[in-house]
Every structure is written in structure tokens, then in C-alpha cells.
Image (spheres, coloured by chain):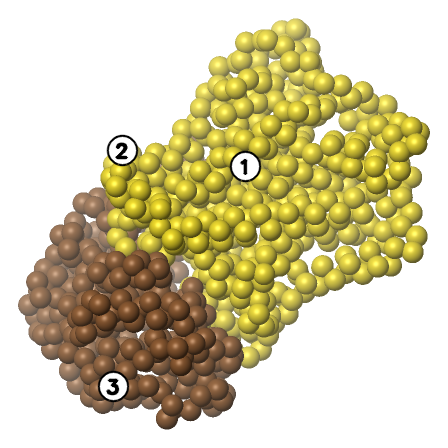
Amino acid sequence: MSLAAPLLRQAQRTPSWLLIGTLVPSVLVAVPLFYVAVRSFEAGLTGIASEIFRERTFDLLVNTLTLAACVTTAAAAIGTAFAWCVERTDLPMRRAWRVLASLPLAVPAFVASFAWSSFHAGFESMAGAIFILSLASYPLVYLPVAAALRSMEPAFEDVSRSLGKGRWETFFRVILPQAGPALGAGALLVLTHMFAEFGALSLLRVQTFTTAIFASYELQFDSATAALQAAVLVLLCLPAAYGEMRLRRKIGVARVGRGSARRMAPVRLGRWRLPVFLCFCLSFALSLGVPLLILVYWLTVGFSAGRGHSDILPAIGGSLSLAVPGAFVVVLLALSPVLLSVRHEGPLSRAADRLPYIVHGLPGLVVALALVFVSIHYLRAFYQTVGLLMAAYAILFLPQAQSALRASIELVPARLEEAARSLGRRPLAAFMSVTVPNILPGIGAALALIALELMRELTSTLMLAPIGVATLATEVWTHTNDGEYAAAAPFAALLVAVSALPVYFFTRRSIGIEDIQ
Amino acid sequence: MSEIVRRRFLQGGAAVGAAFLFPAPFVRSAGAEDVRTLILYNGQHRQTTDAVVQAFAEATGILIAARNGSSAQLANQMIEEGDASPADVFYAEESSPIAALSERGLLAKLDDGILRQVPARYAAKDGSWISVSARCRVVAYNKSMISESDMPASVLDFASDAWKDKVAIVPTSGAFQQQIVAVEQLHGRDKALAWLKGLKENGRVYNTNNAAMQAVEDGDIATALINNYYWFSVAREIGTENMRSALHYIGHRDAGALVTVSAAAVLKSGRKQALAQQFVAYMMSEEGQKVIAASMAEYPLRRGIKSPYALKPFEELDPPDIAPDDLGDGSAALALEREAGLA
């Protein structure tokens, strides 16, 4: 049996490689903040005031918050319910559902929203957007919560039940608090994702700060308005990131080793078994079936079918050549802040760990322009190199990598590394030989997730990739932009197919399916 | 994919691969610095650009590497880049992004020989850019929801209560913005503002032109204020005979019949001025204009070239007397949109 106890945090000296490793992503993330601040202040104080206190800003605020709050709540509810059903009940085919439930991640939101909006115009509304985006983003909650449920200490639940508490009370007072950090981290990702969502909303007639930022850059040149709108988005992310940090701090649960977890008897669903099973089938059909059907429909009706087939291989090559090295760079950069915040807790390490989440609410366009600005002015030789694009990827996707890494890093006790140190290893060597092998599953999961996100990234790839490089995502954009939906279909389908691989891998890694086989 | 683009891709791919094999991923790929390779920032529909780039390469042997994106985003990028921009030529879907670059002094003057290829009104007054092809503002309507005889005489009428929930607008589109400038120049600021307020009240806002066009085709809304080519791109995709929507040309020198253009320019900061001028000259040559006209449903602007598409003859459009250069970079329109609560 494993032992769950608050981690003993010792006041030990932080190794310098960890500090430097944390400084790099912090500096990167500060770049768009710097850019937004510089551009905002160009508007002058009166300009800022007149921009912020407009009816339009208020409308955008209401829309952005409504969308983000509703999608986050719905995704959290669906994700948690699915995770519990898959991990703790006698749901039919639960082993298959473990992977299937996360597959909607492979469908880019703009493909889903195109599918639904061409199905019925009623989906081109706030309610429709909430529906589509909730279905597309619940896996971001489902995955960490399912992983948390699997690694949870069953003894707590036994104690609760033995004290005469019912199933519901046990769920809400014992299970949910333990899953809290995982749920909170997933929900924060969804929330900030919604702040930055553009592709899906451009088809759905919903205006948020991010669609307004894109519009400002469409209608205006060297725009202070767009910068101010981006500043508002950053301000919206602050309380969310702070709240999640508080949630994490209240519950510090860790255990030593993975233990020989006793298998729990699954909860019998009884007469609910079939309805719950049908719910799973329905959500699968809605989130994956409908978008794929629409791709098939495009292929069969459009005259542009077949156009650009010779671009397919280069586009796959382009996607992989950027996404795979990109994933390594992003995950490498994400390691230090997570390690620092887990091992050497303090206000500074917590801030460094949370900083990327604040910027995660910014659209890719702002991040890309910030990097153009900074590299042109201060690092001209870097401009339009793969290196700069990797920096953009890091700024955009660090939080996802951090979330994927955190669970496995929290499970490795610092004492293992201390034992290696006491045997004479240098800090870095001790880390490499003891900690790294233990967190490999987390690293694998993070690599898969980031590769997935990078493959569908569009805006900063268009602006910053070395000239002439095309990816699956840029090809889909080109063809749909010209109304050639049939020509876009194979690229979109390939994007889903190529994304399904990392999703599958990520799911296996992060839920730890190998355990039960 | 053309041979040149393929070669460029392979070079790019090799550079990317090599960059990761060696511990120096931050060097600029050498291919882009090639003296014989022009760098094009392209905001025009890609099939058009691909066609003209390929024809140019076949005619001259000069290679072109293109960065694709939306015209306005590319213009914003070039403004951030300033003197350090790697771009030699900018080919924009609309004239306002290119006018914005011109106002900031980032464009070189085009050779007189190039400027003479089109009627004077289609070139910038300072000679810094040239219109490549033209299209017309139109009303797309769903044939089963409304008949063409019920169309108003002026685009201004769409702001009235009679059109409540019957007209789709795209306030974030550059062409709609140019239409606002036209209304302002023809009728004055107050009327333009009242028009926009009416449209905000009665019209339905869409986020992209394609979405608005699709909504009319699907019967979700009766009409949309768009450019003519959006209808042709749907028609090309599903077949003209299957179209449930049609185009109404307002004419009568009304702002609703405004002619807008795609445009090209040479960047002042480019290091290959002569080659860049040569490429723009090719775009405006008889050969180049034929290639461009064949690739999309727009009016070629060089005298004597006809579009192979079934477009309404250019002479019958009867547009208002507003030249592309008069439309500027659209900042006046944005102020109006903001006042009306549309932006």
C-alpha cells in the first residue's frame, strides 16, 4: 500500500541549472506582455480610457466571459463525469472508452464548428458555440481527472464508506477534493483556451475579445486598440490563474512510489448502465462522427476535390518537421518551472510556474506580432528562423506541457534524488539518473499533447515559419479561405488522423493504461 | 504543386532538418537569401498567386518564395518589420493594406512603364502601387427568399427597418470598410453614420465573407453585402446550376456598386529592386494578366484583356466615381464603425 502524506518540503538550496532553466521560459513569456504594454501605452492615457469605457468593450466582455464560463463549466462537468464512469464503474466497454473518450481532442475546433454550422444555422449562436466548444474541449478535463482517479488512494474512500457516508457524499467530500488539482488545472486550460479561441468562432457569429483583436488587425494598422484588447484578455486570465494556484496550494497530497495499488471493485451502475453507455455513444457521435461526416460530404460534392493532392506529402512533412522538434523544445522548457514549483515551493517559483498560464489567453496573432517586434528590434538575426517559431510555440503551449508533466513529477519523491546526491552524484547527474526515468511517462504524454497542438497551430506558423514551408493546417486554411472545401477535406482528414496518434499515445501515457493490462 | 515550389519546399525541409541535426537551429535558411530568389508577401488567393509565380518562373527563370497570409495581417507584419523586412514584393487582396504601407513610406515608386498599363485611376497617385484586378460590391440574395425586383435602388436602403434580419454584413471585411468610405464620400459623414447605425440595428453580423455568402446560399438569411467573387467561388465548388443564390448589381453610381481592387507594390527596403519591378511588370503584362484572369472571377485591369468567367461586363457595372486610391487605408471608416458600435 502506498502512503499518502503532505510532502515534506525542506529548505534546501535550489540548484542553479534549475533557476536558469526557469528563467528562460519566464523571459520568453514576458515578451508578449512587454509588447502588449508598449503598444497599449502608445495610445496614451486618454486613449486607453476611451477605449476601455466603450459600450463595445462591455459587450465583448460579456460575450467572452459567458462563453468561457459556460464552456469551462460544461467541459468540467462532462470531463469529470466521464472520468468517474470510465475509472470507477462497470460501464460496458470501459477499457475502449478510456481512449475513445479523449479522441475528440484530435478534431480541430474549426473543423467541428464548420461541420455544425453547415448542419444548421442555429449553431451559429452563443448557445451553439458553447455546445460545440464544450464537446471539443472536455478531454482537457477528462484526461487529468481520469489520471488522478486512477492514482488515487482507495483507502480514503474505504474510510469514508466505513463511516457510513453514502456514495454521493463520498464522491463530493473525498474523491472530488483529491481530484481537485487535476480538475482545476484542466479547467484553467479550457478557460484560457476559450479566451484565445478564434478559428471556431469566426464561423459562429460570436464576438469575443479575440475575434475583436483579429478584426482590429484586419481593419487597422499598428493598432493600439488590438493591444488594449489583448491587455484586457491578460487581465481576465490573472484571477483564473490565481484561483487555480490557491486551489492547488490547499491540497498537497503526494505518495511515495506508485505503490501496489489495490484494484477497487467497480461501482455497479445497475439500471443506469444502458443510459450511461448510450450517453457515451452519443457524445462520441456528436464530437467525432459529425465532423468526419462533413469532411466526407465535402469530398463528394465539391468540384475542387483532388486539387492540391501533390501538396499532401510536403504538408505532412512540414507539419511533422515543425511539430516534432517543437514538442521537444516546449517540453524541455516546461520541465524546469514545474520541477522548481514542486520541489522548491515559494512565492517566486509559484509565480514562475503560473506566468505562462496568464499569456495562454492571448491569441497566436498577438504572440507572433510580439516576436516580430522584439526580434526585428533586438535580435534581427533570429527573424523568420525556426528558432523564433519555436519560441512562439513555447509561449503558446507551455501551460499544456506543464500540466501534463506536473502529475508525474509530483509523484516522484524528492528523497529519491537526495539519496542519489548522498551517494555522491552531482545535482544534474542525480536528476538525470534518478528523476528522469521516473517521470518518463509524463514526458511522453507531454510530448504527444504538444505535438498535437503544434500540428494544428496556424497563425504564428503563417507569420514566422521559414518562407515556403507549408503544413496541413496552413493548407486547410488556404483552401477553406478560397471556398475550396473539397480540396481542403483530405488535409483536414489527415490532420485529424495524424492527430489521433498523439492523442492515443497521450491517453495511454497519462492515464497509465499499461497498468491494468 | 509546381516544380519551383516543390524545390523550394525541399530546400526548406532540408534546411529545417539540417538545422535540427546540428546544434545551430537559429541560423536563417540560406535559400531565402539567394540573389535570384524574390521574396513575395502574398495576401491574394493562393491559386492566383501560384499561377502567376509559376508563369513568371517559366518565362524568366527567376524563382519566387511566397509567404502567404491575410493581406492586412501581412501589412501589419511589414509595418512591424520596417526597414528590416525581407519582403521584395507585396501582392494584396485589397488596396487598403497596401495604402497603409504607402502612407508609412515603405513602398518604392513603380516604373512608369508599369503604371501606364492601366487607366490612371487604377494606379496610386504617387505611383507607389498598382491595381492588378478589380471586383465589384454586390448584393447576394437567395432566390427562393426574395426576388430581384424587390431589391432596393441604393445600398443605403438596407439600413431601414423593412430589412430587419434580412441582410448579412461583415463589418470586419476590408471591402465592407471601403464601401463605408464610399458612402461617406458620396453622402457625407452624418449619412454614413446613420447608415451604419441602421445596419447594426437591422442587419446580421457575420465574422467572414465566406460565412455570409454560405448563409445566403443555405437560406439562413435573404441577402448579403459582399464582393462578386465570393458567389463565383461557391458556384465553382458546387456547380453554377445548383446555386440557390444569385447576384444583384446595384449600379447607378451608387456606393453599392463600388469597384475595389487587388494591388501590388515593391517594398523600398527590398534588396532586389530591379527583379521586383520586373515581377510587377510581368503581373501587368498581357501574359501575366491573362494568367491572373483565368485563375479567378475578377476583372483584369490591363486594357484589352477579358475575363474568361461569365462576369457582368465591366462597362455595365456603372460604379460611383471613386478611385481605389481615394479609399485610402480605411481608417476613416473604422472611426465610423466604432461610433456605430460595429467595431
Work out whether A357 lies above or below B47.
Answer: above
Chain bearing mark 1: A
Q: What is the distance, in whole Å, between disc 2 and disc 3 at their CAs? A: 52 Å
Identify the residue at image location x=52%, y=48%.
A65
Work out whether B6 lies above or below A487.
Answer: above
Q: Circle 3 sits on which residue?
A: B251
Rendered hue of chain A is yellow
Identify the residue at image location x=40%, y=32%.
A30
State which tag comes first along the sequence, 2 or 1.
1
- Residue A240 has which mark? 1
Using the image as rendered, state which of residue A218 and residue A460 is in the foreground: A218
Q: Circle 2 sits on which residue?
A: A378
Verify CB contact (< 8 Å) between mark 3 and mark 1: no
Q: Amino acid at mark 2?
A: Tyr
Q: Position of residue A83 (x, y in %)?
A: 75, 45
Chain bearing mark 2: A
